[in-house]
């Protein structure tokens, strides 16, 4: 199939207009008229992922985070982004990112599905058309009340995480939670307004965590990677159903850091 056909389908799943203004979702490198047979799915187009794409003879790297966020003045071997772009160009590998448009239309509900949240509402509205509201994050109710300590273990199990950080009383009784994969420290106030007792997100600083406690809401920091890694199995399942003729590969699902 031609790459443009695949990209048209992905744009129907997550239209570009749902992305944030500052975002750079979409085709990062490559030509839409090139054939595509093998796709490598990853969270980021790191050097390791690009090298894997070369070994796997992939025609497309499908990522969550864009390779190019800001304007670049040159593409050379002297720059760590430039090196990846050159490698992909030399091997005729395209790169396509589904970032905040995926966050709005797929990621939020996929994360809420894992926690089996009911009576959901959008945490932060980013777009509204007629009676349909879209946005990042979800707030909803757990199937049954549990302590913050029990919820922490539940999140670890559902998202297959070895560890996470939690701000709050382990014995706190919890029923209503907000979840926002990625960096959600700025949305804690919205979670409070919606009556959430816990905010589950990533990239929480020390001061953001203790300030949240002062305002009366606990915080579970599952890490930026910890929640967003669901992009890989989500898109693999989607592409397998929509395009059974494609050969799919997935980058290793592991955190870009270690904790001792």
Image (cartoon, rainbow, N blue to C red):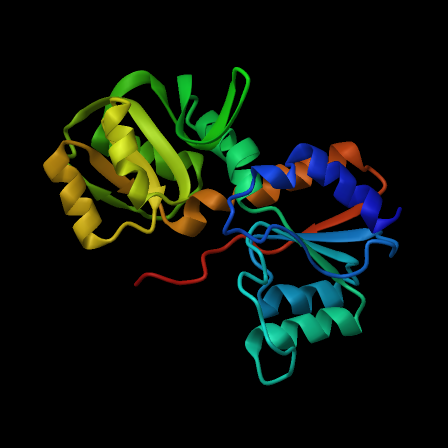
> Number of callouts in the render?
0
Q: Is 26 left, or right, of 136 in this rendering?
A: right
User: Percent from the top left, x then y, of residue 13?
Assistant: 67, 33
Front one among 26 and 173: 26
Q: Is 32 left, or right, of 128 in this rendering?
A: right
Front one among 183 and 240: 183
User: Percent from the top left, x then y, of residue 186?
Assistant: 30, 43
Front one among 33 and 253: 33
Q: Is residue 196 visible?
A: no
Front one among 169 and 211: 211
Q: Residue at x 31, y 26 (%)?
A: 177
In the image, is residue 218 above or below residue 195? below
Q: Residue at x 53, y 51 (%)?
A: 23
In the image, is residue 130 above or below residue 105? above
Q: Residue at x 23, y 27 (%)?
A: 197
User: Percent from the top left, x then y, of residue 132?
Assistant: 53, 19
Which quarter of the figure is the C terminus placed in?
bottom left
Q: Is 18 left, or right, of 11 in this rendering?
A: left
User: Percent from the top left, x then y, of residue 199?
Assistant: 29, 34
Task: Give the residue furthest to the bottom.
Answer: 78
Task: Give the residue furthest to the left.
Answer: 214
Q: Residue at x 34, y 18 (%)?
A: 141
Q: Is residue 243 visible?
A: yes
């Amino acid at each position: 199939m031609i790459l443009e056909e695949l990209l048209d389908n992905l744009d129907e799943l997550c239209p570009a207009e749902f992305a944030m203004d500052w975002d750079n979702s979409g085709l990062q490198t490559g030509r839409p008229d090139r054939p595509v047979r093998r796709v490598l799915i990853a969270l980021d187009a790191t050097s390791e992922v690009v090298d894997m794409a070369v070994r796997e003879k992939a025609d497309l790297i499908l990522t969550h985070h864009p390779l190019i966020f800001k304007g670049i003045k040159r593409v050379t071997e002297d720059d760590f982004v430039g090196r990846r772009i050159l490698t992909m160009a030399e091997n005729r590998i395209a790169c396509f990112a589904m970032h905040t448009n995926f966050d709005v239309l797929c990621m939020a509900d996929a994360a809420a599905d894992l926690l089996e949240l009911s009576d959901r509402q959008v945490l932060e509205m980013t777009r509204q058309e007629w009676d349909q509201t879209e946005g990042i994050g979800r707030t909803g109710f757990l199937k049954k009340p549990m302590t913050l300590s029990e919820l922490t273990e539940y999140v670890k199990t559902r998202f297959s995480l070895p560890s996470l950080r939690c701000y709050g009383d382990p014995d706190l009784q919890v029923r209503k939670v907000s979840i926002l994969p990625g960096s959600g420290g700025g949305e804690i106030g919205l979670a409070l307004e919606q009556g959430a007792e816990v905010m589950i997100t990533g990239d929480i600083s020390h001061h953001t965590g203790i300030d949240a406690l002062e305002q009366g809401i606990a915080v579970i920091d599952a890490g930026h990677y910890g929640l967003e890694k669901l992009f890989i199995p989500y898109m693999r399942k989607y592409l397998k159903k929509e395009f059974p003729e494609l050969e799919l590969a997935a980058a290793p699902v592991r955190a870009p850091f270690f904790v001792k």
